[in-house]
Amino acid sequence: MRLESLVIATVLFSVAQGWTQATKVAGTQQVFDVTQAQAVTAISNAFAQWHYKRMDLESAKYDGSVPGWHGTNGWILFPLDGPITVTPWRNSKELVPYIPTFHITVQALGTNRTIIAVRTIDARVIHGKEIGVHGGWAHHEVNVPPVLSEETNVLMAISNVLLTANSRRTNIAPSVTITRPTKPPAVPGTEQAAFEEAVKAAQAARAKPAGTNQ
């Protein structure tokens, strides 16, 4: 990793430490000095081909991975193979597998300023076993509060793509930290097309054989 990338990633991680209390319910968001188009491209590239913790990116408009939840814009990032990390069980020293699903949105603030927001819409852990619906034993899943450091990690994955794509820029680091609004940013009709195209691009990238040049 280039020194510039390391320094900026460190800044992002340091700023993230202040998000925990301020965004416990609403999620985590950050302002980046990039255009909305750059943000959309970075999101689709960051999570293409399941490279990020074996998670899949789909349009929130069409995804149904979280029963009872329906998005109108942005993306859903969800695990394909169950847990993506471990987390303490109810403030104890016991570590249990953690299974989150994220909603990612963008909102343009100006020509070169864009909010990228990450909100956990489903958070579960595996704790023990239970009798499965078809008999036998199955994992016992328990709903838990979101692990906010994982929202931060999603933002860092997007930031790393922006750094790679804009390696000659020095203002790519987040410039403002704010709490997430109560409602996800609305996406006007003309901008919704950008979301759909980004999702299609990510799906097309995943369909290419390993080692195929982009």
Image (spheres, rainbow, N blue to C red):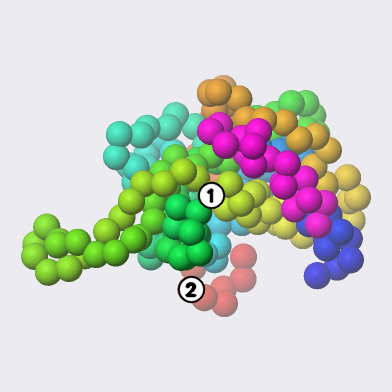
* Residue 165 left/right relative to 140: right
Q: Which residue is mark 2?
A: 209
Q: Write the residue at 60% across / 25% down.
A: 181
Is 34 situated above or below 140? Answer: above
Q: Is residue 40 left or right of residue 128?
A: right
- For this orientation, the residue located farthest to the bottom is 211
In the image, which is nearer the foreground, mark 2 or mark 1? Answer: 1
Q: Amino acid at mark 1?
A: Val
Which residue was labeled with disc 1?
147
Instruction: Please say whether residue 99 is one of the residues in the magenta stretch.
Output: no
Q: Is residue 167 visible?
A: no
Looking at the picture, does residue 154 appear above or below residue 145? Answer: below
Residue 25 vertical position relative to residue 50 in the rendered view, above or below: above
Q: Secondary structure at mark 1?
A: loop
Q: Which mark is residue 109?
A: none
Which quadrant of the rendered structure holds the N terminus?
A: bottom right
Residue 23 lies in the magenta stretch:
yes
Nearest the eye: 42 or 120: 120
Q: Residues within 10 Å of mark 1 (few under 14, many from 20)?
A: many
Identify the residue shown where x is 52% and y is 75%.
210
Q: Which residues are magenta?
A: 10-28
User: Percent from the top left, x then y, of residue 113?
Assistant: 78, 33
What amino acid does circle 2 point to? Pro
Taking the spot 86% from the left edge, 68% from the top edge, the residue there is 2
Q: Residues within 10 Å of mark 2 (few under 14, many from 20)?
A: few
Q: Residue at x 89, y 66 (%)?
A: 3
User: What is the x, y in percent for residue 110?
Assistant: 78, 26
SS type, badge 2 = loop
- Dot 2 and dot 1 residues touching (CB under 8 Å): no
Dividing the image into 4 quarters, which one contains the C terminus?
A: bottom right
